[in-house]
Image (cartoon, grey):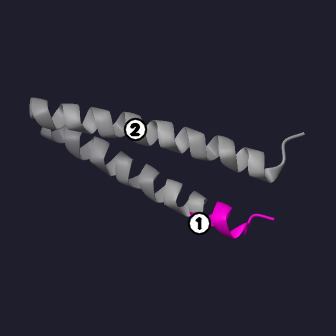
């Protein structure tokens, strides 16, 4: 059975991997001058970074118990 800490660990790993991928893609779009793609990727990146920050706060405070 999965406990909450393990689930949060999986969520954190997922958010970190997606954030890294989006950073790479956004940098690639900037260098290729794909303005629409860049803006969309930056928006998604910001959302994932916010989600990751919120998750880290929850994990540090153990508020999920």
In the rendering, at what x and y percent does residue 28 appear?
Answer: 20, 31
Left or right: 52 in relation to 11 = left
SS at circle 2: helix
In the rendering, at what x and y percent does residue 10 appear?
Answer: 66, 41
The C terminus is located in which quarter?
A: bottom right
- The answer to whether one can see residue 34 in this image is no
Q: Earlier in the sequence, mark 2 or mark 1?
A: 2
Q: Residues within 10 Å of mark 1 (few under 14, many from 20)?
A: few
Q: Residue at x 30, y 34 (%)?
A: 24
In the rendering, at what x and y percent does residue 29 appear?
Answer: 19, 33
Give the residues in magenta: 57-65
Q: Is residue 40 above or below residue 51?
A: above
In the rendering, at what x and y percent does residue 14 appear?
Answer: 56, 39
As drawn, the label of residue 20 is 2
The N terminus is located in which quarter?
A: top right
Q: Residue at x 48, y 36 (%)?
A: 17
Q: How many angstroms separate mark 2 from mark 1 (CA)?
A: 19 Å
Front residue of 57/35: it is 57
Q: Is residue 8 above or below residue 41?
A: below
As drawn, the label of residue 57 is 1
Q: Residue at x 73, y 69 (%)?
A: 63
């Amino acid at each position: 059975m999965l406990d909450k800490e393990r689930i949060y660990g999986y969520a954190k790993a997922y958010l970190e991997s997606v954030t890294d991928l989006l950073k790479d893609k956004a940098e690639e779009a900037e260098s290729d001058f794909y303005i629409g793609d860049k803006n969309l990727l930056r928006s998604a990146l910001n959302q994932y970074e916010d989600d990751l920050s919120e998750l880290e706060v929850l994990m540090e405070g153990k508020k999920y118990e």
